[in-house]
Image: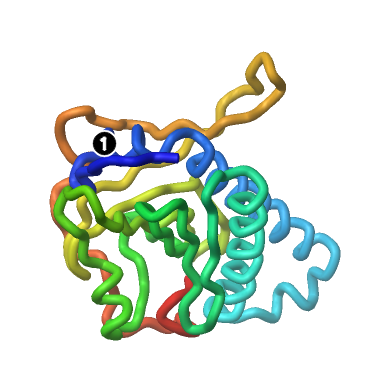
Amino acid sequence: MFFGMVDPRNTQSVVEALGQSPLDAIGAAVRDTRANLATYRSTLPELAARHSQRGILNWVHDQFFANARAQFESNVEGTSVLDREPTRDIFVGHTFRFRLKKHTDDDMVSSYPTDAFLAFALQDPPQLIQEVRLIGGYRWDSETREIGTAVLSARDGKSNVLWVVELAETASAADGLVHFQPRGVDPNLPSLPSLPTIVETVEIEKDSGTQ
């Protein structure tokens, strides 16, 4: 388990402090949710086709949260889960707090601007006792309604993306395990400049802790 200071504005600092298992948990949850969606569509095509964009996103989010929870609780040391709607967060130790959301192609995420979300979106400065707040998720193609690449992102304020990394699935290692490696980690600088990230009016949210 990690002990020490983390700079949430630096991708490498966060990735090194996290270790491999949380990255694998997010990547595997996205992979499994993609498979869930394909099974749903092939098994019950007429029912699946009835969903609105909002409806299918709500369905996908519920599967994603269940898959992520199972992955974290089974494979990541120090995991605890707060599943009390409207808040559904995953904690790793006392340092990392994850919220699970879809990302658009420009790395926007959707949430009602409640006090709880605005507090979540802010980062503590590096210090001995801190909470680093991250969003694990996937890219979503709204036209094809398909789940894309797994991603991990950090924000500092509702309109400020610090960085986003894609989690690329690797070939099975010698031990037979598949890992998800972050692409484009810069050891010195955040991966992306600041850009708008939160949609003030959204059609897909059920609550402040979802999607």
Between 128 and 103, the one nearer to me in the picture = 128
Q: What residue sits 81% from the left and 60% below the top?
A: 42
Q: Residues within 10 Å of mark 1 (few under 14, many from 20)?
A: some
User: Number of callouts in the render?
Assistant: 1
Q: Which residue shows up at 34% across the image and 83% down it?
A: 112
Q: Work out whether residue 62 or residue 116 is closer to the camera in this orientation and state it.
A: 116
Task: Residue 70 in the image: state x and y as whole percent.
Answer: 67, 55
Where residue 199 appears, as percent x and y from the top left, is 29, 75
Amino acid type of the residue tagged 1 in the rendering = Ser
Relative to residue 145, is residue 93 drawn left or right? left
**Image quadrant where one finds the N terminus:** top left
**The residue positioned farthest toward the top in the image shown:** 174
Q: Residue at x 70, y 81 (%)?
A: 50
Residue 113 appears in which quarter of the rendering? bottom left
Q: Position of 95 compared to 24: left or right?
A: left
Q: Would you say 143 lies left or right of 104 here?
A: right
| Residue appearing at x 16%, y 30% in the figure | 188
77 w.r.t. 186: above or below: below
The correct choice, above or below, for 77 with respect to 180 in the image is below
- Type of colouring: rainbow
Q: Secondary structure at mark 1?
A: helix
- Relative to 198, does residue 73 appear above or below in the rendering? above
> Residue 8, how many percent across, how many down?
23, 48
Relative depth, front residue between 119 and 58: 119
Rendering coords of residue 194 (x, y %):
14, 54
Residue located beneath label 1 in the image: 13
Q: Quadrant of residue 61?
A: bottom right
Q: Nearer the viewer, residue 10 or 203?
A: 10
